[in-house]
Image: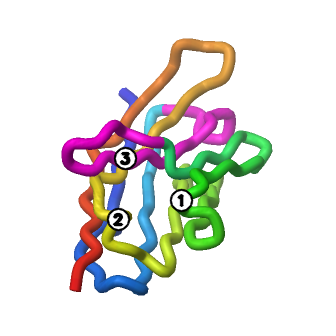
Amino acid sequence: QVQLVESGGGLVQPGGSLRLSCAASGVIFSIYVMGWYRQAPGKQRELVASITDSYRTTYADSVKGRFSISRDNAKSTVYLQMNSLKPEDTAVYSCNAVRKLSTANYWGQGTQVTVSS
């Protein structure tokens, strides 16, 4: 059974930092493309960052230079380091795992990030 479990969300002041973690089980983690998505109230879900099995990364324009995605295959975990947080970063952040050339596509339950003073 595949599970993706996020952690690390919470309330932070503008300009602060958070690190999200997503621990995977039930999959061969190293072959999956891992992504972080977010959805704010009343808005569509958007891709924040992704990292491939070969460690190639992509970022949404709105987070470039502030967020950093990384993965530790030995721990089957993907991270999202979020710095210089803004109120507009407030959303539920969810972890996604996709296996290329297959229909395998898994989601975590999400973790709330709130940026507010």
Residue 41 falls inside the magenta stretch = yes
What segment is highlighted magenta in the picture? Answer: 27-46
- Circle 1 sits in a helix, a strand or a loop, which is it? helix
- Mark sitting on residue 62: 1
Instruction: Give the amino acid at mark 2.
Output: Glu
Residue marked by disc 3? 94
- C-beta proximity under 8 Å, tags 1 and 2: yes
- C-beta proximity under 8 Å, tags 1 and 3: no
Expressed as whole percent of the image width and height from the top left, the position of residue 17 reads: 43, 81
- What is the CA distance from the residue labelled 2 to the residue labelled 3? 16 Å
- Circle 2 sits in a helix, a strand or a loop, which is it? helix
Instruction: Give the amino acid at mark 1.
Output: Ser
Instruction: Give the amino acid at mark 3.
Output: Ser
Q: In the figure, is residue 4 to the left or right of 66?
A: left
Few, some or many C-alpha atoms within 10 Å of disc 2 (few <14, some 14-19, many ≥20)? few
Q: Earlier in the sequence, mark 1 or mark 3?
A: 1
- What is the CA distance from the residue labelled 1 to the residue labelled 2? 10 Å
Q: Earlier in the sequence, mark 1 or mark 2?
A: 1
